[in-house]
Image (spheres, rainbow, N blue to C red):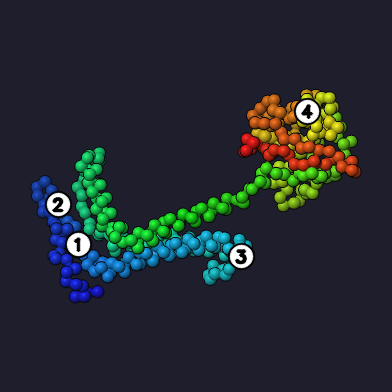
Amino acid sequence: MSSQDIPEENLPAAQDTAHGAVKLADEKNPFADPGLPPHEHRIQDIDERAAKRSERTVALLFTLSMLATVGFIASYVTIPVDKTVYIFPLGRISALNFALGMTLGVALFAIGAGAVHWARTLMSDHEIADERHPIEASPEVKAKVMDDFRQGAKESALGRRKLIRNTMFGALALFPLSGVVLLRDLGPLPGTKLRETLWSKGKLLINQNTNEPMRPSDIIVGSLTFAKPEGLDEHDHGFQTEIAKAALMLVRIQPDDIKDKQALEWSHEGILAYSKICTHVGCPISLYEQQTHHALCPCHQSTFDLADGARVIFGPAGHALPQLRIGVNDEGYLEALGDFDEPVGPAFWERG
């Protein structure tokens, strides 16, 4: 667009010669200060139609960012993790990764491009030379900063360019949702899985060494035996996850030596079933002293009295080992009469 197409009243009255003022050399400053180059007005400064076009361009970029963010979320929700697509020249790649990367990249680029175009075409482009001043902020400097801020806010036309303002706020408000969605990839929601194990009423106690169901006669007084729930196989994909909660240790004590009333009621003929997972940091308990009925965690020496409800008598563990109520079925095999009555393992739990 030439100056002939611009209404005469919009043209600058005169060239901004002060902007390029030159300071001559003298004895104190032997080098002349060339000053700043003369200021040249942009088409948006003198033609409101051009300014409106720039405003719409910025708004379009911010709107594109919002659409890309929505596309990011939609891709995350709808595209299967195992789906692949052929993209030349990359070959076959993950459709989900490609969609997430493209939409996130477009969302970021559109916000940046919109901000740059806004600054270069609509905000003030006057270059200002400021003299050096002491580092400390005097009242005059503070006042100048506030004046500059107000002037910048005025020149940005944020209040007048409502379309830009509203779309920019929309893009900036919507884009962080991408990060919120990514938090979902920290892992599946646990639900109640941390509070439940594979033990349930009627599940047989399987000897971890022989993989055979156990009868009361298989456990002698003073012995320590380890068990797992019926149906849990070492070759199962989730074996380690499940055994970390369901691992069981069985100890047989003379009923007269069992001090805790509930422990006695939940036992069978003096056979007590406790979680094998230490309530300190989750180490497997494997050391047993049959004279004192104490079980010792080898990691940090937490000690539990199995004859007294597996309460803690030494060490950093926070609470007693959970007990599993057991009985025998019609065939004479030991079985669980339910799940643990409280979460196993260390202290999340603090009984929460």
Distance from Cα at disc 3 to Cα at disc 2 = 68 Å
Quadrant that contains the C terminus = top right
User: Element type at marker 1?
Assistant: loop
Apparent side of residue 131 relative to residue 255 in the rendered image (left or right): left
Where is mark 2, residue-wise?
31
Q: Residue 63: x percent and y percent? A: 41, 64
- In the rendered structure, which amino acid carries the disc numbered 4? Lys
- In the rendered structure, which amino acid carries the disc numbered 3? Lys
Q: Which of the marked residues, 4 or 3, is nearer the chain's N terminus?
A: 3
Can residue 115 be seen here? no
Where is mark 3, residue-wise?
83
Q: Please identify the quarter of the rendering in which residue 331 is found.
A: top right
Quadrant that contains the N terminus = bottom left
Local packing at callout 3 (Cα closer than 10 Å; few below 14, some 14-19, many 20+) is few
Q: Residue 261, which numbered label?
A: 4
Distance from Cα at disc 4 to Cα at disc 1 = 93 Å
Apparent side of residue 310 relative to residue 331 in the rendered image (left or right): left
Looking at the image, do the residues carrying marks 1 and 3 touch, with CB atoms under 8 Å apart? no
Outermost residue on the left side: it is 27
Local packing at callout 4 (Cα closer than 10 Å; few below 14, some 14-19, many 20+) is few
Looking at the image, do the residues carrying marks 1 and 2 touch, with CB atoms under 8 Å apart? no
User: Element type at marker 2?
Assistant: loop
Q: Nearer the viewer, residue 289 or 349?
A: 349
- In the rendered structure, which amino acid carries the disc numbered 1? His
Q: Nearer the viewer, residue 50 or 131?
A: 50
Q: Residue 254, which numbered label?
A: none
Q: Residue at x 16, y 71 (%)?
A: 8
Q: Residue at x 41, y 56 (%)?
A: 172
User: Element type at marker 3?
Assistant: loop
Distance from Cα at disc 4 to Cα at disc 2 = 99 Å
Q: Give the number of the mark in front: 4 or 2.
A: 4
Distance from Cα at disc 1 to Cα at disc 2 = 23 Å
